Image (spheres, rainbow, N blue to C red):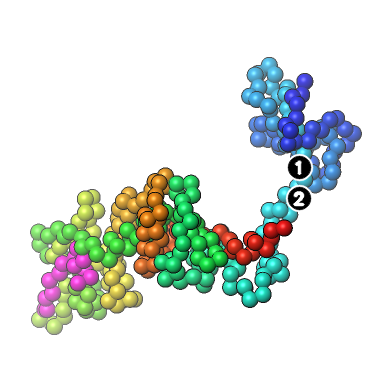
């Protein structure tokens, strides 16, 4: 005999004919056309599931049937168009509307348009949510900040800026297969190469062609860098002269170190510690995401718009 329907569900008895497009979903996650189970309106969906795990002798002998309207679900879930949002805007409050899609790049661009890095120092700390997120307020806007991602970004940029990689001397200098222009880039940025653990000797042959010989390479545990990493640095410094940069393999190593040393999801934070994490964001070059690409923050809502919806 069928089990009693859930209080929140509508029990459906036998009926003459189903609606077009009705689907039944049962416990084994298969789908089949419903032809004899009940009379439904167009657009309805029937969900069928066992009240409990059935024994082999009574498999699917006890079921619940729940009716819900598909059109109502689609209407509630579909995002509003920009035109609909524009109609809800308050005069003079257009800049408060956040419309970023759920992608890191779009969210970063949205936040850059609406706030600047100095605003982080002015944010009011409201509290911690779910032992992983900091809720802040800036004027009439509420933001949620990922405590791990933002601390990881701060630790990563600090490592990038101040860390000098240990060097390992080579038994004999190693010639680099690079042209004179690349040698000039190395000479002009010796300090940056040394911070990355590369040391050089410069010689000049009888033909007046200058050469760079690699005498030491960066070494950290199992990571040993070489000629290819020098060439990567030369390329980066050609694009952005005199700007501190790192080879990609060192960047990945720093990202891993920053992750392990940062505040974790699940760590309880007091108000003072949360304020320090948020203030750090105002000092970062790229505060919008962690070095692995995880967003550091999201806009929750505009309190003015929320208050207008109240009865």
Q: Quadrant of residue 168?
A: bottom left
Farthest residue in the top direction? 57
1 and 2 marks in contact (CB < 8 Å)? yes
> What kind of element bears circle 1?
strand
Q: Which residue is mark 2?
A: 72
Q: Quadrant of residue 232?
A: bottom left
Residue 261 vertical placement versus 181 (above, below): above
Q: Nearer the viewer, residue 263 or 246?
A: 263
Q: Nearer the viewer, residue 167 or 226?
A: 167
Residue 248 vertical placement versus 93 (above, below): above
Farthest residue in the bottom direction? 208
Residue range (magenta) = 191-205
Q: Residue at x 67, y 70 (%)?
A: 89
Q: Residue at x 49, y 49 (%)?
A: 129
Total marks placed? 2
Whether residue 192 appears in magenta in the rendering, the answer is: yes
Q: Quadrant of the C terminus?
A: bottom right
Within 10 angstroms of label 2, few (less than 14), some, or many (20 or more) residues?
few
Whether residue 4 appears in magenta in the rendering, the answer is: no
Q: x and y percent of residue 285 in the render?
A: 37, 68
Q: Which residue is mark 1?
A: 68
> What kind of element bears circle 2?
helix
Residue 95 vertical placement versus 7 (above, below): below
């Amino acid at each position: 005999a069928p089990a009693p329907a859930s209080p929140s569900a509508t029990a459906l008895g036998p009926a003459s004919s189903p609606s077009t497009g009705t689907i039944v979903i049962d416990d084994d996650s298969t789908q089949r056309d419903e032809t004899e189970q009940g009379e439904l309106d167009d657009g309805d969906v029937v969900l069928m599931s066992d009240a409990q795990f059935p024994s082999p002798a009574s498999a699917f002998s006890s079921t619940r049937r729940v009716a819900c309207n598909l059109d109502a679900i689609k209407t509630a879930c579909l995002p509003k168009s920009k035109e609909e949002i524009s109609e809800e805007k308050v005069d003079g409050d257009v800049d408060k509307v956040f419309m970023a899609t759920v992608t890191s790049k779009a969210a970063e661009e949205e936040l850059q348009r609406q706030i600047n890095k100095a605003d982080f120092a002015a944010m009011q700390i409201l509290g911690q949510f779910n032992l992983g997120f900091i809720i802040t307020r800036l004027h009439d806007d509420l933001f949620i900040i990922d405590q791990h991602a933002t601390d990881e970004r701060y630790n990563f940029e600090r490592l990038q800026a101040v860390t000098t990689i240990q060097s390992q001397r080579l038994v004999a200098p190693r010639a680099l297969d690079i042209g004179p222009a690349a040698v000039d880039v190395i000479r002009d940025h010796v300090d940056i190469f040394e911070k990355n653990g590369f040391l050089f000797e410069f010689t000049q042959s009888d033909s007046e062609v200058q050469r760079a010989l690699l005498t030491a390479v960066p070494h950290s545990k199992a990571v040993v860098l070489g000629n290819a990493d020098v060439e990567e640095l030369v390329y980066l410094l050609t694009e952005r002269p005199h700007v501190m940069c790192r080879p990609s393999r060192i960047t990945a190593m720093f990202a891993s170190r920053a992750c392990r040393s940062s505040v974790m999801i699940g760590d309880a934070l007091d108000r003072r510690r949360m304020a320090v994490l948020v203030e750090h964001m105002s000092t970062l070059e790229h505060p919008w995401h962690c070095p692995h690409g995880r967003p550091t923050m999201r806009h929750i809502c505009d309190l003015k718009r929320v208050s207008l919806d109240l009865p």
